[in-house]
Image (tube, helix red, strand yellow):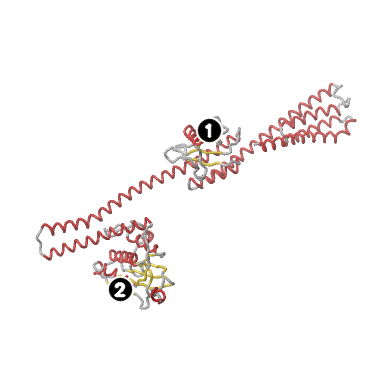
Amino acid sequence: MKPVLSRLRNTVFYSYLQSVSIVALVLLLCYPLSDTQQYYLVSYILLFAVLIMAVFLPIGPVFLAAAMSSLAWNYFFIPPHNTFHIEKTDDILMFVLFFSIAILNGILTSRIRRQEQLALEREERTSLLFKLTQQLSKAGSIDEVLKIAIAEIKLHFGVNVFFILQDGNNILYSTGRLQKEKMLNTAEYDVAEWCFRNNQEAGALTPNFNHVDYSFFPLPGTKLMPGVLAVNPPFQMNGEKRTFWLTFVTQISNAIEREFLAEVAGKARLLDESGRLYKTLFNSISHEFRIPVATIMGASDSLLNSKLPSDVQNVLSNEIFTASVRLNRLIENLLNMSRLESGKLLVTPDWCDINDLFNKVIDDLKDELGMFKVKVSIPEYMPLVKIDFGLMEQVLYNLVFNSTQYANPLTCIELSSDIENHELLIRVKDEGPGFTDEALQHLFTKFYRVKGSKAGGLGLGLSIVKGFVEAHAGNVTVENNPLQGAVFSIRIPTEVADIKNLMLPDDHE
């Protein structure tokens, strides 16, 4: 504050010095006219000089220049010279008129200039507020609004600020929204909360609780108060500057309130959607579990309480087994999804033969594949690859099972594998209906099911495929076959077996 006052004093002193210097210079230039009868002309020249100074200097130096000019004109130019005595009545009247005109001219010109300056300042502030509004309107979140606000306040007011917002339940946080390192102590927090509750300024340089170091300004809102603005070090504001500051804060507050309400609405929508999703999933899971459980219970009850022929018992036993397999598949998918989301999925790569992998999956799905033609394409030179056999078995199982659910009976399901650019390539092709463009974008999304698909399943199979493949640092894609059906392609970076890789430690001895 002291350097500012010092600069202000120096500016005022310089203005007075300019005033005195200009009057002295004009008097010096006009001094040769002192011995002539042209002293009236000198008064016009001095009036013109005062007018010019009134355009550029404050009212004080202009008043001083008018007084000095009239007195100097009397002393040096109005007969008798070098005295303040005036003999002629006309000269006395001229002197009074000169003094009055010089004073009025200086005052009026300075006032006009001041009004013009105020108009320019208002125009500039209006322009700044408009630019601020434009920037805030482009912000897409509370944090973006705060970043813009902090930068603009620093630019136009030269102070550092931080924003303390509420949590949505009208309870203030004790730290800044962006500047988490700025934490209020107990006394400061109490003042900030009072400012928030009472919608009044508080803290340093305000009428309320000025014992703390911060100045707190409420952030007004139409539907709710987002929080308070903390300023440190505080600064004095008066008149137009204070009006500009409060308008500036109000614009920022409106933008924060807008984003705050949007954030609250977004959370409400998320909760609502989560509730609907939970209800849908609960109903779907309950339905999917109820079918195999009901089958098992019904068949078991018939076996226990009725004497049935052996062929009927075999049929019921097969139904129990089929339902148990379906139930086990549902449980495994849920457990696998839980492992993926928890981040606890452990990949243990080992040398594997792709023929073994394909044969294992085909054998597990022999009942589902009974009505299809199965084609396996593996090159003779296919080496061993390093993958997690258990995880890839589930990946391939889900893809092939998915094909059996959507492809038409008696069509071909093809499994192929190869090595390309140090990557293991596995493809699963079917001759089903394929997928729409919309379905292709969401197939690997959790709980997504293609419209018009058969009942059954939770929509987890392909999302598990994606998770297990990505756990191998690979990727899986799907596209429609140009002829018919769909093609799932898996690419996984893998080591290719050679003699050195397969040697055991004992072999070196």
Q: Quadrant of residue 265?
A: top left
For the residue marked with disc 2, what is the amino acid? Lys
Residue 455 percent coordinates (x, y):
26, 58
- The secondary element bearing badge 2 is classed as strand
Residue marked by disc 1:
202
Residue lying at 74% horizontally and 32% vertically, measured from the top left: 61
Residue 242 percent coordinates (x, y):
58, 34
In primary-sequence order, the first of circles 1 and 2 is 1
Q: CB atoms at circles 1 and 2 under 8 Å apart?
A: no
Residue lying at 55% horizontally and 29% vertically, measured from the top left: 207
Q: Nearer the viewer, residue 431 or 156?
A: 156
Residue marked by disc 2:
375
Left or right: where does residue 224 sit relative to residue 400? Answer: right
Q: Nearer the viewer, residue 76 or 278?
A: 278
Q: Vertically, is 443 above or below 241?
A: below
For the residue marked with disc 1, what is the amino acid? Ala
